[in-house]
Image (tube, rainbow, N blue to C red):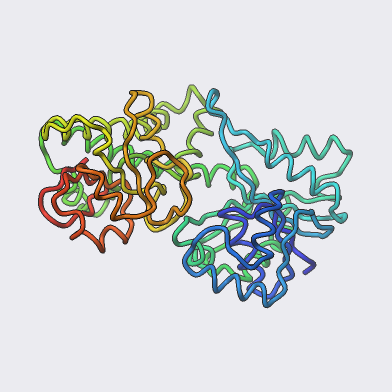
Amino acid sequence: MSMINVIGLGYIGLPTALILGESGLKVVGTDYNSDLVETLNNRELPFEEKGMPELFNKAIENGIEFSSEYQKTHTYIIAVPTPYIKESKKLDPKYVISAVHSVLEVCDKGAKIIIESTVSPGTIDKYIRPEIEKRNILIGEDVHILHAPERIIPGNMIYELEHNSRTIGTDNVEIGEKIKGLYESFCEGEIIITDIRSAEMSKVVENTYRDINIAFANELAKICHVDSMDVYEIIRIANQHPRVNILQPGPGVGGHCISVDPWFLVGDYPDLTNLILTARKTNDSMPTHVLSRIRDIMREHDIKDISKVGLYGLAYKENVDDTRESPTLQLLERMDEHLAFGVKVYDPFIHERIVEHQFMDYGDFLNEIEILVIMVGHDHIKENFDLIKGKHILDTKNIYTLDGAYKI
């Protein structure tokens, strides 16, 4: 196979480029961010991820390249961001459209353009095909469009790239089989070939299902709090039933998948998504619920200074440095709206200051606070529970094993 040009070297594109390179394929990773490209060419990784340094070194040995320029070749994988428009809740396809335009400027005749970015159902029909057809380029002859939505999560990316099943949406089964062969170079999971719209919809449905399940758990947490019941014990018992699998409540939903993708359906089908909309509102309400629990604890202990409150964790999930749609950032926004300034913040995985009153030293952070809010269940805090004895602890992740912590 000719060279593969991976477009977008973020949390999805970079591991994908590296695993393809590690597999022995000729790969060039492209990103418009020249600083990122320079970092990679200096043999430095832009974010932490288990197993990625080893993958990086192997891909470099096999000749992977990084560039700000799109390459002339037959195979492209597009893994650029797909945000939603907050006012309409619809997908903003501008980055995907821009990437496709740039590919069309250089690609070989018959090139296969694989969009890995998660998109709303119908995006390729509504936005991508018209942009290609404007140029009098024949889809299915001059270029082939496919959709192979990513299915990995920060913290376990490499394992999931290798073991999760994949979906390839295509207009042409023969082309789909060729791309299936490409993914089989590293993926041990089942690879399903389907039509493009089914591939688009299936990825959004996966994340929406989880969002709704988490919303149910969060709603249970609020109910149980009102009547002093242990939501974790109730969920544990309920999950003994063979057909029940309730997820865990938490301080909110973050990341670029579960907290974003359901909005695509709400935006496109506003009259048909009452359950999905309610789930989104429920999960988005959790940072405000955490704020109310902080207020309760402050009142109980006659603490009037919000600067005595510390939030542990800025990432959206444990043991990663990914802060996209982080519940802690959402909580800080709520505090700002309520004129609650001065709360302290610490995260062992975030090495640059991205918010006010963020501490780089854990000891200094603990010395400044009386109330500790566990927003993220990093292994770091689990291994250092002895350091937080004596604090008033609000454990939103149900990880604190000693007595005396408040729950969500």
Q: Quadrant of residue 293?
A: top left
Can you give x and y, in whole percent of width and height, for residue 374 in the image? 27, 47
Residue at image position (72%, 39%) is 97
Q: Is residue 9 above or below residue 51?
A: above
Q: Give the left or right position of residue 160, taking residue 124 as reference.
A: left
Q: Quadrant of residue 44?
A: bottom right
Residue at image position (67%, 77%) is 61
Between residue 370 and residue 268, name the one nearer to us. 370
Q: Give the left or right position of residue 192, taking residue 326 as reference.
A: right
Residue at image position (81%, 40%) is 132
Can you give x and y, in whole percent of width and height, for residue 168 in the image? 63, 55
Residue at image position (47%, 26%) is 272
> Number of marks in the image?
0
Can you give x and y, in whole percent of width and height, for residue 249 in the image? 28, 43
Between residue 387 and residue 286, name the one nearer to us. 387
Work out which quarter of the rendered image holds the N terminus and state it: bottom right
Between residue 313 and residue 237, name the one nearer to us. 313
Q: Give the left or right position of residue 157, taking residue 45 as reference.
A: left
Work out which quarter of the rendered image holds the C terminus and state it: top left
Q: Is residue 34 above or below residue 295?
A: below
Can you give x and y, in whole percent of width and height, for residue 93 in the image? 65, 36
Q: Is residue 366 above or below residue 135?
A: below
